[in-house]
């Protein structure tokens, strides 16, 4: 099998050596017409200028704020006729030779690609270019999405025949099924081995931390007050700590006995990941045990421990404005106003709690209760804002259900990845990870929900230029995202 694979590689080398050498040239010009005002020109222009095309090509980027009902093709042609007649061929029927246009409507959610006759690609390849940008565009990363689309266009426009997907597929199939199998096997093994090594390193870092601090962790646990409701909950977790550490030690011994070849097997990647997850959760828990001891007993390091308890909540509050101002964030709504009002009020409250902890007016348990209540209130406000966001984007009950499912999965899904994203705080240990609805979870759910609805609405390509296009038949199409 490997001999067949080697022979096939030799065939490829001969083909590539015998073909006409492909050029690698940067754009002959870059024109940015950001009428929507969504692009970072300082990042965009250097990135596009550095992209290499197979043939000398002029790149034009055009953005405007339209609507979902617009025909982007028609709009791009209208703009070119009015502002850039140089984008159109002398006879007025095609796009100019040597030109590649990337167009974006961030409001109407459309992306389009247009080429001169000497640069045109198939409809499937135009779809490919647009798809390369859509994940970033759905996340409102307009500049990065544009760069990704132009980069994919550079790969496909005037692509040499021997680099085309059709040729590669045909060569593999024609060459040898056995060779293809060998290549696939080698790739899978290499990827699996790299993944295993990465997980092994992650596990070893956490395991070393836990092992080094093992005696300190036991000492900290021995002085946590059981009279504290939070202390008793953390101690419940600690009672299984040594058993879990011993289990992690056993996993460590097993994975370190694996040979490099064995690390290439998927069952062993699963085993190494299990070791890394177990060690990471123990590493987080011993930090919580240390913080519980320091805070609940008001040791010298209690201010640092308290700051760590506040950190997840502060992070949520800091991310609220970005959430509310993002596309479809419904930042002008009543629920958004409630979130902003809560944020401003609670930031002052946090400082008051800290001062009261310092002078002994409240106990550590009372401070943690207030933090729990505040995070619960934020969760409730985020859930209310979820309905506002859904009402603002969904057009039907079916679309509302799709968005609601995306939001719910984002919140509940954090529990499925608890060991990979364990919150090293007292509240994160006492309460399940889905108890608090976080801003990152909201963002993830919003992106998922909008993507699901956009896909359900259909992202099929549009190739015509509308009623105003006349006899214009330049190569180009657009689709929604």
Image: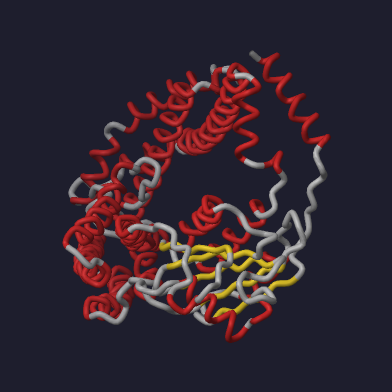
Between 370 and 261, the one nearer to me in the picture = 261
Measured as percent of width and height from the top left, residue 132 is found at 53, 54
Measured as percent of width and height from the top left, residue 367 is found at 25, 64
Between 324 and 202, the one nearer to me in the picture = 324
Between 187 and 248, the one nearer to me in the picture = 187
Q: Quadrant of the N terminus?
A: top right
Q: Quadrant of the C terminus?
A: bottom left
**Looking at the image, which residue sits at the far bottom?**
82
Q: Residue at x 20, y 67 (%)?
A: 387
Image quadrant in which you'd find residue 154: bottom right
Between 82 and 480, the one nearer to me in the picture = 82
Q: Residue at x 36, y 53 (%)?
A: 294
Residue 236 visible, this orientation: yes
Measured as percent of width and height from the top left, residue 374 is found at 23, 67
Q: Residue at x 71, y 68 (%)?
A: 58
Image quadrant in which you'd find residue 314: bottom left
């Amino acid at each position: 099998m490997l001999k067949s694979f080697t022979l096939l590689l030799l065939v490829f080398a001969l083909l590539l050596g015998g073909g006409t050498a492909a050029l690698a040239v940067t754009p002959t010009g870059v024109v940015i017409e950001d009428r929507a005002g969504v692009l970072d020109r300082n990042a965009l222009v250097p990135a596009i200028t550095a992209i290499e095309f197979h043939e000398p090509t002029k790149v034009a980027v055009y953005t405007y704020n339209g609507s979902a009902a617009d025909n982007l093709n028609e709009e791009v042609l209208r703009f070119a006729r009015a502002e850039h007649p140089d984008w159109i061929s002398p006879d007025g029927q095609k796009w100019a030779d040597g030109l590649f246009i990337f167009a974006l409507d961030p409001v109407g959610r459309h992306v389009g690609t247009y080429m001169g006759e000497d640069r045109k690609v198939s409809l499937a390849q135009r779809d490919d270019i647009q798809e390369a940008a859509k994940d970033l565009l759905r996340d409102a990363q307009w500049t990065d999405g544009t760069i990704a689309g132009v980069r994919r266009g550079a790969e496909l426009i005037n692509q040499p025949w021997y680099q085309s997907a059709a040729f590669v597929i045909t060569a593999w199939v024609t060459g040898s099924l056995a060779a293809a199998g060998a290549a696939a096997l080698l790739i899978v093994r290499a990827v699996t081995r790299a993944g295993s090594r990465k997980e092994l390193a992650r596990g070893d870092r956490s395991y070393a931390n836990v092992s080094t601090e093992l005696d300190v962790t036991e000492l900290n646990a021995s002085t946590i007050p059981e009279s504290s409701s939070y202390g008793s909950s953390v101690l419940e977790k600690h009672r299984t700590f040594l058993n879990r550490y011993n289990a992690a030690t056993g996993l460590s011994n097993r994975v370190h006995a694996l040979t490099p070849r064995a690390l290439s097997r998927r069952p062993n990647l699963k085993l190494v990941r299990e070791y890394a997850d177990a060690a990471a959760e123990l590493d987080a828990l011993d930090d919580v045990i240390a913080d519980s001891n320091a805070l609940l007993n008001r040791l010298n390091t209690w201010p640092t421990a308290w700051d760590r308890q506040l950190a997840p909540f502060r992070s949520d509050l800091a991310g609220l404005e970005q959430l509310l101002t993002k596309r479809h964030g419904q930042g002008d709504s009543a629920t958004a106003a409630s979130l902003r009002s809560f944020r401003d009020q609670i930031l002052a409250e946090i400082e008051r709690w800290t001062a009261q902890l310092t002078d002994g007016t409240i106990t550590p348990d009372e401070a943690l209760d207030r933090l729990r209540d505040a995070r619960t209130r934020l969760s409730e406000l985020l859930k209310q804002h979820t309905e506002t966001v859904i009402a603002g984007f969904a057009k039907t009950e079916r679309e509302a259900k799709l968005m609601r499912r995306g939001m719910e999965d984002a919140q509940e899904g954090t529990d499925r990845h608890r060991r990979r994203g364990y919150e090293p705080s007292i509240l994160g240990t006492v309460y399940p990870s889905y108890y608090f609805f976080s801003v990152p979870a909201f963002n993830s759910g919003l992106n998922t929900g909008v993507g699901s609805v956009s896909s359900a609405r259909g992202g099929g390509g549009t190739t015509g230029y509308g009623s105003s296009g006349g006899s214009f038949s330049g190569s180009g199409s657009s689709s929604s995202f």
